[in-house]
Amino acid sequence: MNLPAHYQHVIEALPRVHQVIRPTLLRSWPMLNKLLGFEFYLKHENHLPVGAFKVRGGINLAATLTDEERSKGLVAVSTGNHGQSLAFASALEGVNLTIVVPEGNNPGKNEAMRGLGATLIEHGKDYDGAKKYVEEVVMKESGARYVHSANEPALIAGVATYAYEIFQDLPDPDTILVPIGLGSGVCGTAIVAKHLRPATQVIGVQAEGAPSVVETWRTKEWTTADSVNTFAEGIATRVPAEMTMDIMNELMDDALLVSDDDMRRAVGHILQTTHNLAEGSGAASMAAAIKYRDRFVGKKVVGILSGGNLDLKELPRIMQMMNSN
């Protein structure tokens, strides 16, 4: 299959991304290894300027805009990390950016996007409601270049640079666990892994309360939902994306589901053990490592800590769960 993003695109993205950010930490934490019973590494994308992996894609895309696209500006829909990444990259390139977020979105992420210079519009009950408003109203009125959070080869190639970094530090991982929202991260990881070490399994992780992408991948039948039920807004997806589903169908090895409480406990373990703050979606890979630990015994496993932008209102509940265990 002729995929829209491939390994050469990742190689071309590396100098653009690394001109702005340094490679992030890949670390095996002894207490997490003890908890899990196997060799486990966290890739700390929470250390990036906007606290999430998506900034890599934003940097790569913004650096490759045409003069016309720069003059007309960009528009996007986001629950936070995609928007923050584009806001950061657009500010670097001097490009105007409008972001539509769902009503009631994570206030910290809204504040961060505004702080980076983006114009915010709050509309829609969830991500897909905001997306519909962008595509049917904002794009027509503004003429700006719409940046989809997944159907963009430049975004996929940009975020895939973290996977390239993993293999520079750890050439032989058996498994890489990657949170799935719309799938740019797991697609980028799979593109790199299948080129550098085909034996490495790339496994996506999604919330039980928002399983549309996993169900579409498993059944090969397009699956959507009228609503989602998860606190992890970074993976609260009702409708899959065409481009990333094509890549996942071709390259992803497996897909797992975790509950909200699985993710909350994973946030707590990461915080207590590593003193790093993960958001719900960022901790999904750790949650899967715990929940499905028996299948990973004897293997080297990497978990992508994809973001650290947790709504701090969640922390008391998380710590209460940890203290009651």
Image (cartoon, grey):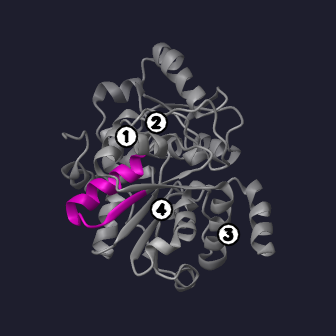
Q: Quadrant of the N terminus?
A: top left
Camera-side residue: 177 or 270? 177
Q: Position of residue 61 (x, y in %)?
A: 34, 41
Q: Which residue is mark 3?
A: 268
Q: Position of residue 212 (x, y in %)?
A: 51, 40
Residue type pointed to by label 1: Met
Residue type pointed to by label 2: Pro
Dominant SS type (magenta): helix
For the point 67% across and 76% down, which residue is it?
Answer: 272
Quote the CA–CA distance across marks 1 and 4: 23 Å
Front: mark 3 or 1: 1
Task: Check if residue 103 falls in the magenta segment.
Answer: no
Pointer 2 or 4: first along the chain: 4
Q: Which residue is mark 1?
A: 245
Label 4, secondary structure: give it: helix
Mark 1 Cα within 10 Å, few/some/many (few <14, many 20+)? many
